[in-house]
Image (cartoon, helix red, strand yellow):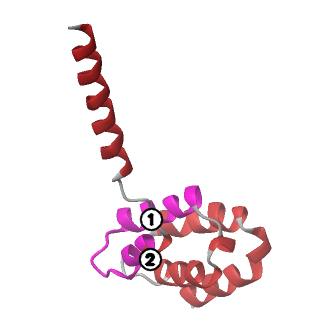
Amino acid sequence: MAIILLLIAFFLLLKKSKKKDNKKQLELKDLLLIAQNQNSTSDDILLSLKLFNENFFIDDNKEMSFEFFNYILNHKNINKEVFQFFHKEIKTKNKNYQKDLDVIERKALG
């Protein structure tokens, strides 16, 4: 009887671990899709920027990162909070790209 219970527990744990493996990994292109979507809210935009800051570096994919920032800063639903997060967090974390980020920021403001 104990062996049967152990086997059942083993299969249940195996089934749970397979479910966890099926979760989709966050990719930069997912965040880019949010930024490109004109129906994204300011909350969506801010969340995507925060997720970028937590999970990615510009060095991971420089071209796509700058494309993402460009869409974010030029989005029709951008607000002060999004802009401040970009200015304080993204630019601070990515000091090696300060000049490039300044250009994107100036274009969005001008």
* Residue stretch in magenta: 30-55
Q: Residue at the spot x=59%, y=90% of the render?
A: 107
Q: Main secondary structure of the magenta part?
A: helix
Any mark on residue 77, and which? none
Residue type for callout 1: Ser
Q: Which residue is mark 1?
A: 48
Q: Nearer the viewer, residue 5 or 55?
A: 5
Mark before the other along the chain sequence, 1 or 2: 2
Q: Position of residue 67 (x, y in %)?
A: 54, 85
- Residue 9, placed above or below residue 17: above
Q: Nearer the viewer, residue 64 or 4?
A: 4
Residue type for callout 2: Leu
Q: Residue at the spot x=57%, y=55% of the render?
A: 54
Instruction: Answer with left or right where residue 22 lies relative to residue 65.
Output: left
Instruction: Answer with left or right where residue 13 lies relative to residue 57.
Output: left
Q: Residue at the spot x=27%, y=13% of the render?
A: 3
Q: Position of residue 1 (x, y in %)?
A: 20, 8
Badge 1 marks a residue whose secondary structure is: helix
Instruction: Answer with left or right where residue 94 lies relative to residue 18.
Output: right
- Residue 66, placed above or below residue 15: below
- Picture quarter containing residue 58? bottom right
Q: Are marks 1 and 2 in contact (CB under 8 Å)?
A: no
Residue sitting farthest toward the right: 96
Q: Which residue is mark 2?
A: 32
Answer whether residue 36 is magenta in the image: yes
Q: Residue at the spot x=22%, y=16% of the render?
A: 4
